[in-house]
Amino acid sequence: MNAKGELVELKFHTQKYRQMAPAELSAAVVDVIERARRQMAVKVTQAYAQFAPEGVDMDAIATGSFDPGSMLGKFDLPHLPGAPAPSPIDRQ
């Protein structure tokens, strides 16, 4: 896996895969790829965590669920044109 979570190489170190049923081989390959993707995500998150501002959820950034507006809403910044106006509740 590369840092983007993309498969860049797949090696079979034995010939055992030749004896597996197609569905079994498929399930094993998918499982290995998902485990490798999760491991790489942890490594990338740990590598970048040292550069993140305090309180930033690196897991949320890695999964794409981070809302930068929630972090910026803590600052008393003027409303940006075209952006939804923050509610008074959001500013508390």
Image (tube, rainbow, N blue to C red):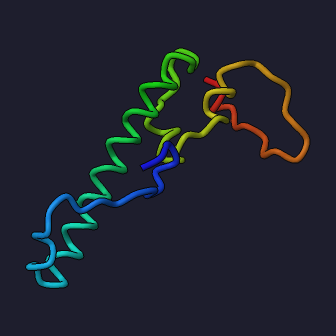
Q: Residue at x 25, y 67 (%)?
A: 29
Please provide percent x and percent y for residue 68.
Answer: 64, 35
Please provide percent x and percent y for residue 47.
Answer: 47, 25
Q: Residue at x 47, y 31 (%)?
A: 58
- The correct choice, above or below, for 21 with respect to 90 in the image is below
Residue 43 placement: quadrant: top left
In the rendered view of the protein, which quadrant contains the C terminus? top right
Residue placed furthest toward the bottom: 22
Please provide percent x and percent y for residue 76.
Answer: 76, 19
Please provide percent x and percent y for residue 46.
Answer: 42, 26
- The correct choice, above or below, for 77 with respect to 29 in the image is above
Q: Residue at x 53, y 15 (%)?
A: 54
Task: Give 64 or 32, whichever is nearer the viewer.
Answer: 32
Residue 39 placement: quadrant: top left
Residue 30 placement: quadrant: bottom left
Counting every numbered tag in the picture gives 0
Instruction: Locate residue 69 relative to residue 55 in the image: left or right.
Output: right
